[in-house]
Image: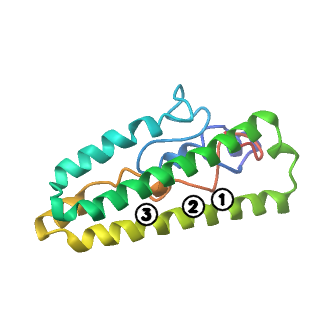
Amino acid sequence: MSLQAQNRGDGWGPGYGYGHHMMGMMGGWGMGGPMMGYGADAYLDRVDGRLAFLKAELKITDEQSKAWDELSTVVHDTAETHNAMMRSMMQDIRDGKLDKMTLPDLLTLRETHMEARLEQIKAIKGAVDSLYAVLNENQKKIADEIVLPAVGMGGMMGGGWGMGRGPGRHWQ
C-alpha cells in the first residue's frame, strides 16, 4: 500500500486516535468528523432530551423511578466526565502535544483513556442492570430495541481507539 493510500486522511489507514471510527452510538467526536461544527459540549446539550425520550418510551412507573433516577444520574456523570476528557484531548491535539509524544507515551495515554472508559461503562452497566431488573417484559423488549443515550457507550458500535484519521499519528 502506498504512503498516500495509507495516509489519505479519511479515517482509514495507519494513524492514532479518534477519527470517523469514533461514531459510537450517539454520534461522532473528533475534529473534521461527522459532528464537525458542534462544540465539545454538543452531546451534553442532548442528554436530557434523549433520556426523556427513553423514559417516555419505557413508560417508567413510580415504582421504577428510583432505578431510573440512578441510571439518569450515572449517564449525566459519565457524559460530563467523558466530555471533559475529550475536551482535554482536543486541546492537546491543538497544542501539538501528541505529536511530540513517544510511542510508549502514546500507548500509555491510550491505555489510561481506555481504562477510564471501561470504568464509565461499568458504572452505566450497573445502573442499567438495576433498572432492567425492575422492568416488566414489555419494557425490557423496548429497552432492548433502544440505544442507550450515553456517551459512556460511545465506541461500541464501531468506534473508539484504533486506526485514526490523517497522516502519521495525528488525532483528527
- Residue nearest the viewer, comparing 16 with 30: 30
Measure how far apart labels 1 and 2 are at the Cα level: 6 Å
Dividing the picture into quarters, in which one does residue 165 lie? top right
Residue occupying image coordinates x 71% and y 49%: 15
Q: Residue 91: which disc?
A: none
Q: Which residue is mark 2?
A: 117
Q: Amino acid at mark 3?
A: Ile
- Residue nearest the viewer, comparing 163 with 40: 40
Q: Residue furthest left?
A: 138
| Residue 22 position within the rendered picture, expressed as x and y whole percent measured from the top left | 54, 48
Q: Which residue is mark 1?
A: 113
The colour scheme used here is rainbow
**Crowd class of label 2 (few under 14; some 14 to 19; many from 20; radius 10 Å):** many
Q: Which residue is mark 3?
A: 124
Q: Marks 2 and 3: which is nearer the front?
A: 3
Mark 1 or mark 3: name the one nearer the start of the chain.
1
- Residue nearest the viewer, comparing 84 with 23: 84
Dividing the picture into quarters, in which one does residue 88 lie? top right
Measure how far apart labels 1 and 3 are at the Cα level: 17 Å
Q: Marks 1 and 3: which is nearer the front?
A: 3
- Residue nearest the viewer, comparing 104 with 51: 51
**Crowd class of label 1 (few under 14; some 14 to 19; many from 20; radius 10 Å):** some
Residue occupying image coordinates x 52% and y 53%: 159
**164 relative to 155 in the view: left or right:** right
Tell whether label 2 touches label 1 (CB within 8 Å).
Answer: yes
Q: At numbered mark 3, what does the secondary structure look like: helix, strand or loop?
A: helix
Q: At numbered mark 2, what does the secondary structure look like: helix, strand or loop?
A: helix
| Residue 32 position within the rendered picture, expressed as x and y whole percent measured from the top left | 59, 32
